Image: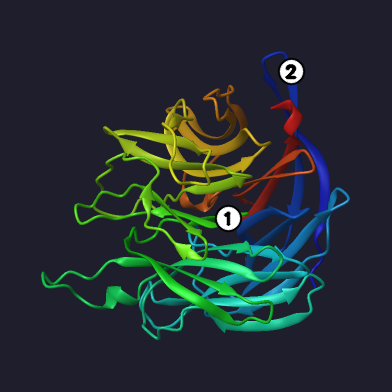
Amino acid sequence: MKKYVIALSLLSLLSCSSNEIIIEEISFLHDNNNAQPSLVSNNGNLSLTWISSDEDMNASLNFRQFKNEVWTNPISLATGSDWFINWADFPTHAISGDQVLTNYLKKSASGTYTYDVFLSLHKLSGEKVKEDFILNTDGFKAEHGFVSIASNDSDGFLITWLDGRNTVEKDKEGDHRPMTIRFAEITNTGDIINETELDSSVCDCCQTSMTYTNKGPLVAYRDRTEEEVRDIYVTRNIDMAWEDPIAVHNDGWVIYGCPVNGPKIASNSNNIAVSWFTVSDGIPKVNLSFSESYGSSFGIPITINDLGAIGRVDTAFLNEKEVIVSYMEGDDDGTYLRIKKASIDGTVSKPITISKIDSGRGTGVPQLEIFDDQIFIVWTVFNNESNQLKIVKLSSNDV
């Protein structure tokens, strides 16, 4: 195992109103390229997965937890040389009991976007439970990815993904049929059960998002109509049945291609929050909407951005009524990764700039989580001729 070095250093002092906000950088050093982070806070755990790769594209999927103010030693959960590695379609994971389930993408044919979703199930100690098993068992050489995973109340896992099995066929007009979104449960022995299609026409390559409440899972994604309206929809499972998807808000964004900019959903008791990027009336926006009824309906969107929105959002509940939203925005002077606090009553804080940031794909999709009254954010930077992860934290009491 290569040596990892973890250190804490003061990144910056930022002023917000009369308070000084201390942002600390958690240094992350490694010999190879490191990118595609997934940061998850769940059931008292803060955990991170990411992909390391060398010049020959040999890749490893790594996992570690944050305990006692330091990261645990990394564990390699999967390795390969035939993976599909992409800034937007990155592996994710969840912890259920003493197990962690994660995913990665493996090429199934020579086409650029022909790949399958593979899963690896391990104990938190690194002990193997079931390795390298395929999620999508349709057998079609097509695109499968953009996975979201959630704990199934410490009894296995819930998983959703974009599935291109229908795209290999053409409709009456000669166009390829649309992408779908599917859902399944993964047992604690690695069996795939209760698989179902949630929506037969969705945007091709926007990230999905899922949260689990005491009434069941909710899934958020970018829909696609026949008129190429690509707004954010949610569907929820109530009493063991999936309801018809509904729009979080009718933005009416018509775009003839995928914006590669998915939503993020979070929950606290019966309260649900969804943040997303859209272009409404030609104006790019980052929006946030709340539901106080387990996602049966949503309130009027709150605009989060102040400058030109880029999106790549994340959202986490700070308490029952407030969330933190991370997002990217920019102007002629540069692009910035920022956070805001927003409340169900519509109150929105001033922005806190986490960092000036590259607007390109190399940055990936910044990840936000709240753990032990601290806000953690991770993204990818290009440093010393390689990609590396940048991780910072700040006190949630300062926001």
Q: Is residue 314 visible?
A: yes
- Which residue sits at x=59%, y=44%? 270
The residue lying toward the viewer, choosing from 271 and 89, is 271
Please identify the residue farthest to the bottom as the structure is shown. 139
Tag 1: Cα neighbours inside 10 Å, few (<14), some, or many (≥20)?
some
Amino acid bearing label 1 = Lys
Tag 2: Cα neighbours inside 10 Å, few (<14), some, or many (≥20)?
few
Q: Is residue 130 left or right of residue 204?
A: right
Which quadrant would the N terminus be assigned to in this image?
bottom right
- Which residue sits at x=37%, y=57%? 244
- Which residue sits at x=11%, y=69%? 173
Q: Can residue 356 be seen in this view?
A: no
Amino acid bearing label 2 = Asn
Residue that badge 2 annotates: 19
Which quadrant would the C terminus be assigned to in this image?
top right
* Res 338 quadrant in image: top right
CA gap between label 1 and label 2 equals 39 Å
- Which residue sits at x=82%, y=72%? 125
How many dots with numbers?
2
* Res 47 quadrant in image: bottom right
Residue that badge 1 annotates: 215
The residue lying toward the viewer, choosing from 332 and 291, is 291
Q: Where is residue 273 in the image (x, y as percent from the top left)?
A: 53, 41
Q: Position of residue 64 (x, y in %)?
A: 76, 62
Please identify the residue farthest to the front as the structure is shown. 239
- Residue 38 has which mark? none
Against 23, residue 142 (above or below) is below
Which element type, helix, strand or loop, lies under badge 1? loop
The residue lying toward the viewer, choosing from 352 and 164, is 164
